[in-house]
Image: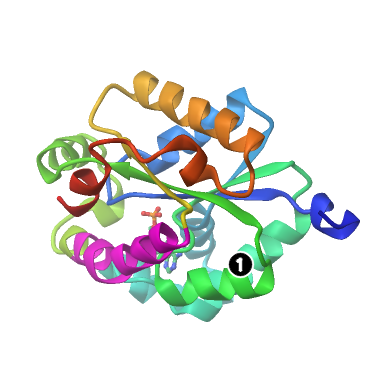
Amino acid sequence: MSPVASERPSLIVVAGRPGAGKGTQCARIAAEVSAAHLSLGDALRQHVARGTPLGLEVRPFVDAGRLVPDRFALDLIDAQLERERAPMVLLDGFPRNLAQAEALECRQPGAVSLAVLLAVPLTTVAERLRSRGRPDDGEPTLRERFASFEHDTKPMLTWYERRGSLVVIDADQPHGDVTVAVKALLARSHTNHRHPATALGRPAAGSSLFSR
Ligand code: AMP
């Protein structure tokens, strides 16, 4: 690895449908290992709440449960990664579609060491979301956000899978157990940075968890 490349953090893409536990898991893991947690959704919500020029632009998309235009997502992530000094960064909810994944790969070739899908069935996330009460968790916004996962994010996951970077974690279990599973994955992928999914082997239930 070149000296320049080794200064860049290793990026872990964390994906999952609404209610899969992306934010919860990233926060827990970042608190326990040397990793930073970047949540694009949180950053966007802060802009919306503060009424910044960006917030005003993206608000209609966030309120409708649709992805904000890629250029906003990419600019925000660029600015956040620029400031980042941690050796590992957990990207919570970014990239969210194929165009963003390709743009990230173009800007930071080889930086994504792993894409982790937190897989949960719809019945479980429906229960979790009922108790969460976030403004964009109401109908019909939520329906749009689920649709976006199917139409925008799944093709991106297939792209990471073809590159040998995707690992599916069964997130239909208590948060603590999921945290243990993801931390074990990160520890093992650290020892085989180049081909994490190949080194780990896909979980036996991986493809069925992915498609349900
Ligand atoms: P999240 O907190 O990750 O569920 O994101 C909340 C909302 O922020 C989403 O419904 C989108 O409107 C927006 N958002 C978050 N991440 C992205 C992204 N990578 N690209 C576009 N919009 C995003």
Q: Is residue 121 above or below residue 41?
A: above
On screen, residue 81 above or below 177? below
* Residue 24 horizontal side relative to residue 108, left or right: left
Q: Which residue is mark 1?
A: 76
Residue 161 place in picture, x, y as percent:
39, 58
Q: Main secondary structure of the magenta part?
A: helix
Give the residue at the far left of this rendering. Answer: 123
Question: Label 1 sits on what residue type?
Answer: Leu
Tell me which segment is drawn in magenta: 144-163
Element under disc 1: helix
Q: Residues within 10 Å of mark 1 (few under 14, many from 20)?
A: some
Q: Nearer the viewer, residue 44 or 37?
A: 37
Closer to us: 113 or 145: 113
x then y, percent, for residue 35: 65, 36
Task: Let me know if residue 112 is in the magenta part.
Answer: no
Residue 59 % position (x, y): 40, 71
* 59 sits left or right of 19 in the view: right
